[in-house]
Amino acid sequence: MAKIEVYKSRDDDWNIAKPPAGKTESQGASRTRHAGGGAEVPQMLEVRANAGQQVGVHAHETGEIFYIVKGEMIFGQHTLKPGDSIYIPGMMLYSFKAGPEGVQFLNLRPRVDLTHFWPDDIKAIDALPASDKPAFIADNVEKAKRYYGMID
């Protein structure tokens, strides 16, 4: 039988992005997982970015929906405000900038996804044979855990 799961946010749940050497994008952006997700369970993250902060070009394996809670997100020619949402397909590179007062949003994914692909990663994975992609993705997840401050 399925069970109901309750997630309560605490100040110490927040992970601070730590970009790899040579990259400054997303420095200081923070997130916390409200629903950790699983193979059949949706994932929900809450993300905060400081005023004017640029989040670098990247992609994730699964599609995701952003729902703006507070502040503004500048996404290309669009300025998203509280109550607005946007869908980003999986493996699509994107970037955004936090508005003048920062942004806080919910990130919803259909299953757990801890990937974080930079543009070079997308080029590399596209060039791999299908049999090598799972290992590449697993390695990316380990790097993403460090990036999101989930491991040292």
Image (cartoon, helix red, strand yellow):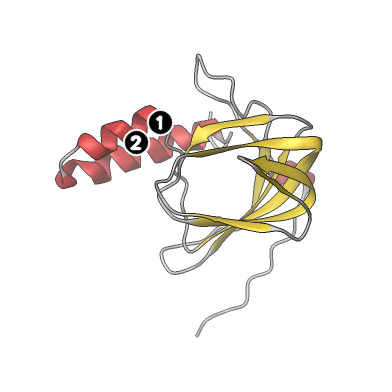
Residue 119: give its label: 1
Please give left or right for residue 117 compared with residue 76 in the image: left
Residue 79 percent across, percent down from the top left = 71, 45
Residue 88 percent across, percent down from the top left = 51, 53
**Which image quadrant for residue 3?**
bottom right
Residue 89 shows in this picture = yes
In this rendered view, identify the residue nearer to me: 145 or 81: 81
Q: Is residue 61 above or below residue 101?
A: below
Residue ID at (27%, 37%): 125
Image marks 2 and 1: residues in contact by CB distance under 8 Å:
yes
Q: Is residue 57 above or below residue 35?
A: above
The local secondary structure at tag 2 comes to helix
The amino acid on which the numbered mark 1 sits, given as a three-letter code, is Pro
Residue ID at (71%, 29%): 53
Q: Is residue 30 above or below residue 65?
A: above
Residue ID at (48%, 64%): 110
**Crowd band around label 2 with a 10 angstrom C-alpha radius: few (<14), some (14–19), many (20+):** some
Residue 34 shows in this picture = no
Numbered-mark total: 2
Per the model, the C-alpha gap separating discs 2 and 1 is: 5 Å
Residue 102 percent across, percent down from the top left = 79, 38
Please give left or right for residue 67 compared with residue 136 in the image: right
The outermost residue toward the right is 101
The residue identified by callout 2 is 122
Residue ID at (43%, 69%): 40
**Which image quadrant for residue 72?**
top right
